[in-house]
Amino acid sequence: MSPRQVSDTRVVAAPAAELFALLTDPAKHPELDGSGSVLASRSTGPRKLGLGDHFGMDMRMGLPYKIRNTVVEYEENRLIAWRHFYGHRWRWQLTDLGDGRTEVTETFDWSTARIGFLLALVGFPAKNLKAIRATLDRLVRRYGG
């Protein structure tokens, strides 16, 4: 892992395909979000995201704003990552454990960000790690662990 990444992992009692369907549907992202910043999907694109697809979200961190993301990594039922115009990424990796459970890792990667130094300066990595943990805990509560 790059020093400009934070991530955490949980085992979730759901098949990888079911979790991947949740991750690839932007309308479901507010249900996942542990940060409280993802409010609603603004996507007019596909309900199931694929590589290169764009999707918009209504967000709030103090003040409301809108963001447009692009899917930049994709492997069916295993990996999806998106980024917005500043270049940092949110990556989800799923490992099917073969018994109906899935190891889920979420990563905030600012190694590709245009303003990575600023993200680190204002504490986004630590804030995002806290949100990642809350998001993964939310998944475990939803499906079991």
Image (cartoon, rainbow, N blue to C red):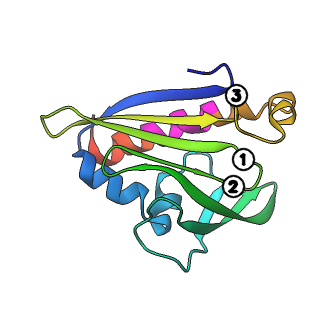
Q: Inspect the image, locate mark 2, and give the three-letter code of the amino acid beneath it.
A: His
Q: Inspect the image, locate mark 3, and give the three-letter code of the amino acid beneath it.
A: Ala
Q: Nearer the viewer, residue 81 or 122?
A: 81
Residue 103 horizontal/vertical position (percent): 31, 32
Task: Determine the residue positioned at 42% across, 73% down.
Answer: 47
The residue indicated by pointer 2 is 84
For marks 2 and 3, the one nearer the N-term is 2
Looking at the image, residue 6 lies above or below residue 128: above
Residue range of the region highlighted in magenta in the rendering: 129-137
**Element at label 2:** loop
Alpha carbons under labels 1 and 2: distance apart: 6 Å
Please give the label number shown on residue 37. none
Please give the label number shown on residue 87. 1
The residue indicated by pointer 3 is 126
Magenta stretch holds residue 136: yes
Q: Quadrant of residue 125?
A: top right
Looking at the image, residue 5 lies above or below residue 52: above
Circles 1 and 2: CB atoms closer than 8 Å: yes
Q: Inspect the image, locate mark 1, and give the three-letter code of the amino acid beneath it.
A: Gly
Q: Nearer the viewer, residue 143 or 19?
A: 19
Task: Determine the residue positioned at 45% across, 75% down.
Answer: 46
Q: Nearer the viewer, residue 115 or 99?
A: 115
